[in-house]
């Protein structure tokens, strides 16, 4: 495995197990809907996302601005699809998934891309200048301080993430391209929160805090100083762990489609959603998707109640009904009681 230099290894991160698990689960199953990481500054949020890049799998991609999947016509851009339907072979290259950054200052045009209307009128053909969503297709789109983004840009992002397509319309001319990406947002709640409607659109949400245990906190400091002193040697020290995790993620991706859940597990997920008072059906659906992914990561083909318990901790808290200015609080003991009654 090629180790990216000067990027802190994912497996060297101390603690923050829920954050690391949420990121890994989204790599295994991009259909989970991304993850929002909320926490105070200096809790390795950005470090974890950057470190994730070294764990991302290699894939085959078409030689186009969107890196289309050459084996799936339903996820191709117009140009690639046209070539395939005319019997032409696509130029295929192997490349790794990557993390694409979206800066807080990004305008809507920078995000979605632009259409040259003058060119369309004069030439009768569409000329599209790809934006960040084009680069993000089949990759991870990372938005640091997502809560400081313009609400309209956040809406556009979440719509594209949900639909897997970016559509831009200007002066009666429209253009669409594939935009299937894993959305990862990080934020410090002290700087303002996201609207509940936007929070609900993230598949998973985790809260992180700095380590409070002395030994673990000492280990955080030791590792960081070692990395800064000699990053090459430090990265090599964790290479075996990195490779082991890459293999585990790859095996989970292969297993994912084989994982099943029983009618009882389905009933349990729905009961948990009802009893914890969440709105809508996203919670139930995401809980099951997450439980399936957890089972695959554990190397199992069947979802167990404990998978639902862990899934609930990632999927439910930000969807809890709450009064203004109050955090949604999920009492895991209540979920445990519900699961115990089904056993």
Image (spheres, rainbow, N blue to C red):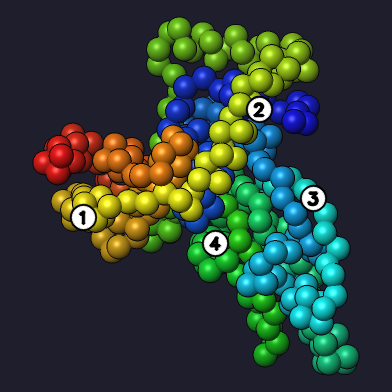
Q: CA distance from mark 4 to mark 2?
A: 29 Å
Q: Which label belongs to residue 243?
A: 2
Residue 55 position, x and y percent, is: 64, 36
Q: Which label belongs to residue 267?
A: 1
User: Of 90 and 286, which appears nearest the observer?
Assistant: 90
Return the residue at label 3.
94
Residue 282 position, x and y percent, is: 34, 60
Residue 264 position, x and y percent, is: 21, 52
* Nearer to us: label 4 or label 1: 1
Mark 2 residue element? helix
Q: CA distance from mark 4 to mark 1?
A: 28 Å
Answer with left or right where residue 150 lies relative to residue 327.
right
Q: Which sits earlier in the primary sequence, circle 3 or circle 4?
A: 3
Residue lying at 47% horizontally and 12% vertically, measured from the top left: 216
Proximity of marks 4 and 1: CB atoms separated by less than 8 Å: no
Return the residue at label 4.
161
Q: Residues within 10 Å of mark 3 (few under 14, many from 20)?
A: few
Residue lying at 27% horizontally and 52% vertically, measured from the top left: 262
* Nearer to us: label 4 or label 2: 2
Q: Which sits earlier in the primary sequence, circle 1 or circle 3?
A: 3
Q: CA distance from mark 3 to mark 4?
A: 24 Å
* Nearer to us: label 3 or label 4: 3
Q: CA distance from mark 1 to mark 3?
A: 42 Å
Mark 3 residue element? strand
User: Of 194 and 156, which appears nearest the observer?
Assistant: 156
Proximity of marks 4 and 2: CB atoms separated by less than 8 Å: no
Q: Which sits earlier in the primary sequence, circle 3 or circle 2?
A: 3
**Furthest-left residue in this view:** 341
Answer with left or right where residue 240 lies relative to residue 33.
right
């Amino acid at each position: 495995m090629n180790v990216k230099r000067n990027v802190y290894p994912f497996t060297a991160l101390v603690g923050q197990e829920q954050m690391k698990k949420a990121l890994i689960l989204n790599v295994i199953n991009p259909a989970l809907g991304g993850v929002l990481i909320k926490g105070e500054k200096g809790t390795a949020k950005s470090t974890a996302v950057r470190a994730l890049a070294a764990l991302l799998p290699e894939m085959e991609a078409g030689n186009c601005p969107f890196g289309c999947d050459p084996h799936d016509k339903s996820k191709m851009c117009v140009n690639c699809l046209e070539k395939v339907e005319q019997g032409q072979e696509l130029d295929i290259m192997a490349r790794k998934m990557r993390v694409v950054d979206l800066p807080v200052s990004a305008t809507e045009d920078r995000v979605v891309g632009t259409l040259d209307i003058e060119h369309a009128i004069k030439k009768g053909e569409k000329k599209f200048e790809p934006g960040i969503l084009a680069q993000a297709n089949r990759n991870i789109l990372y938005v640091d301080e997502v809560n400081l983004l313009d609400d309209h840009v956040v809406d556009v992002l979440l719509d594209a993430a949900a639909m897997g397509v970016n559509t831009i319309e200007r002066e009666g001319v429209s253009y669409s391209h594939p935009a299937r990406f894993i959305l990862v947002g990080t934020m410090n709640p002290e700087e303002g929160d996201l609207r509940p409607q936007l929070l609900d659109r993230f598949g998973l949400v985790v809260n992180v805090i700095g380590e409070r245990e002395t030994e673990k906190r000492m280990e955080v400091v030791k590792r960081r100083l070692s990395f800064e002193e000699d990053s090459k040697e430090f990265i090599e020290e964790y290479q075996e762990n990195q490779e082991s995790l890459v293999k585990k993620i790859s095996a989970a991706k292969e297993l994912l489609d084989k994982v099943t859940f029983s009618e009882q597990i389905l009933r349990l997920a729905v009961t948990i959603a009802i009893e914890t008072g969440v709105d809508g059906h996203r919670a139930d659906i995401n809980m099951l998707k997450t439980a399936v992914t957890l089972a695959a990561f554990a190397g199992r083909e069947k979802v167990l109640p404990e998978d639902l318990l862990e899934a609930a901790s990632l999927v439910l808290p930000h969807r809890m009904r709450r009064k203004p200015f109050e955090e949604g609080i999920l009492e895991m003991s209540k979920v445990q009681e519900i699961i115990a009654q089904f056993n």
